[in-house]
Image (cartoon, coloured by chain):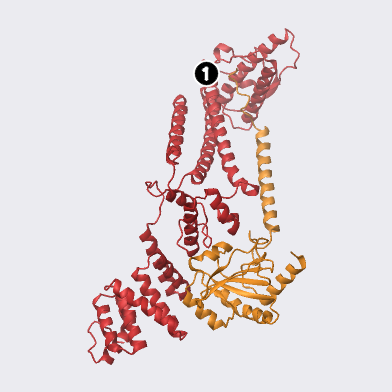
Amino acid sequence: MNRHRFPLWTLLGVVLVAALVVGSGALDTSPPTAAQRAAAIESVIRCPSCEDLSVADSSAQTAVTVRATVRQQVGAGRTDQQIEDYLVARYGSSIILDPPASGWTLLVWLLPLLGGLVAVTGVAVVLLRRRTATRADAPGGAPTLGADPSLLEEQRQFLVQSLADADAEYLAGDLSDRDYLALRQRDMVRLSAVESRLDELRGAAPDRPPTRVLVAEGLLSSDADGVAGGPHVLHAREPDAPATVPVAPAAASAADLPAAAARRHQSRSRRSWWFLGGAVAAFAAALVLAVSLLSSTRLPGQSETGSISLSQSQQIEDTLSRAASLENQGQLGQAATLYQSVLDTHPDNEVALAQLGWLEFETGQQGDDASLMSAGRAMLNRAVGLDPTDYAAHLYLGTVLLQQDDNAAGAVAQYGQFLSDDPTATVLQQAAPEVRLAYQQAGVPVPAGVPAG
Amino acid sequence: MTALDPTDAGPGTPVRHAARWIAVGVLVVAAGLVAVLATRPPATVAEVQSPLVGEQVPPVSGPTINGDDYTLSRPPGRYVVVNFFASWCEPCQEEGPELVKYQYQHQQSGSATMLSVVFDDTTAAARTYQETLGTTWPTLTDPGGRLALSFGVRAPPSTFVVAPDGRVVAYVVAPVTAADLDQIIARAEASGP
């Protein structure tokens, strides 16, 4: 089972890296067009008056200006760096969406890399430990002892500690009789082998103190398979005395130690899986961050790769919707600015013309500003001319004719168009008083569909 | 090579100490972060850093809301307060009377003057606003926001104080008062060119 996991992980990694490389466009060696260059720069410049939006994603006036400047400078042959420097010299370094790789902000770049490194190291350590553990627990996997005395001594101390732990766990009731015995048998065999090897290397007379570990006398003298429950007296004794440790290397194969080996293996496996899970989660988080930082923005002409961006008409709709919302909230100046921003790029947008025309007329009327009223009226006339089916433009123009010119007949003509364009019930209700007034002043019967005022 | 596993640490080994040290490390980092944030200057300071401060004022020219052409002399020869505003901006409405007061106070001596630039607003609305306020200084329309970009303006009101030698000496992003402007100019005079 474990033999298959590593190649699968490797394969997954290779596929992932390949997908990232291809997706990032790093293999595309064709030089970018001017529009692609401008789009790439715009995607890394922060909209000056927005929160964490690039100028490419914003329709604010400041973003429109920056976009125009970028395109102008690209056209003038300036490099990407020169254009960024130009903007930084005016707005400061915060105009660049990516934080600079210096000072404290360097941490933003280093931490993901560090996290990824730690995660990869963690995965490697876990995999190596699992392989080592698998070999150690494998049936017939007899220890092969080297000739390095310091390493052997380290192993000896580890085994002594392991035996002491087993004793402590047994005393605390954490180990069953069977498991305790199996664990002891295994570690004693290994300890014996290590100490024998150490003795060989150091000569016949051992220069180390005899190892003293606790053993459960009653338990060790009983049948390995027939261990009964109940208390056992523990006392110190020499662990490698053959009379009290009735185990031999030949009898200590892993087949004799199923429960203890399985318990230790499961415990280690659980720890490993937690560690592995944490490492993979950290790696995934670092990867997501790296991809978001390094992946390229979709440029004109490129196919979509999962990002959501609004088309030009959707952006206009979005701006008009925001303007209408502001207008309803009484933020008339900001609404007017948004309508104007639509007209800056699309002078024939009849909705923006009608709404801005009406706003300017109303503002001029309140401020007694004839030029503003005149400008608003001109916009309404244009809107009606551009889209004769736009009921809002007809409604506004009718009201202008009625209020400014006292031209009831002209107003009725516009209101007639308004009514024939199927306005919504809410709009009809709001417009009803002016409509009824115009019809009454013109001496024309009020149409049946107009609600009572 | 040995199949034994000395790294499989038992209870009471350095693993627990490692966890303790990691916890201490995290606490130290968190405490450092709190200290840094607590000692930072408050975000409500109106006068802010700008790459323009200390540099020469960008070229300022264009049509005014009354249709005239205007160009700011370089160097201007006196203090010039360049104020970006919009009629829809409430803080601008708050500072408007203070700017009028400031202009009135310095009109006679000619030591300083005002210059307004429309930011993200229609010319008609800006003209109505300035007329209501009773301003007497030039107001540039800034079609396309070119001037705002050259000054690095993000939102109204934004006010720059330009010294007689053409250096930008202050950038304020909140409503200013006549007293604020006098204070800025006094400081600039004291520090010299």
Q: How far across and down, in percent of the image, does residue B49 sit?
A: 65, 61
Left or right of B48 in this view: A296 = left
Q: Is residue B90 above or below residue A184?
A: below
Would you name the residue on which mark 1 appears? A256
Q: Nearer the viewer, residue B181 or A321?
A: B181
Q: Nearer the viewer, residue B43 or A208?
A: B43
Q: Colour of chain A?
A: red
Asked whether residue B42 is in view, the answer is: yes
Which picture quadrant has residue A168? top right
| Number of numbered labels in the structure image | 1
Left or right of B32 in this view: A448 = left
Residue at (70% x, 76% y) in the render: B111
Q: Colour of chain B?
A: orange
Q: How far across and down, in percent of the image, does residue A325 sit?
A: 42, 70
Q: How far across and down, in percent of the image, does residue A125 sit?
A: 57, 30
Q: Nearer the viewer, residue A13 or A220?
A: A13
Which picture quadrant has residue A222? top right
Residue at (69% x, 54% y) in the render: B36
Q: Is residue A426 above or below residue A81?
A: below
Mark 1 Cα-neighbour bin, 10 Å: few <14, some 14–19, many ≥20: some
Which quadrant is home to the C terminus of chain A?
A: bottom left
Q: Is residue A310 above or below residue A414?
A: above
Left or right of A15 in this view: A394 = left
Task: Tell which residue pokes out farthest to the right in this image.
Answer: B190
Asked whether residue A97 is in view, the answer is: no
Which picture quadrant has residue B108? bottom right
Q: Secondary structure at mark 1?
A: helix
Q: Chain of mark 1?
A: A
Q: How far across and down, in percent of the image, does residue A177 sit?
A: 57, 26
Task: Tell which residue pokes out farthest to the top in this image.
Answer: A204
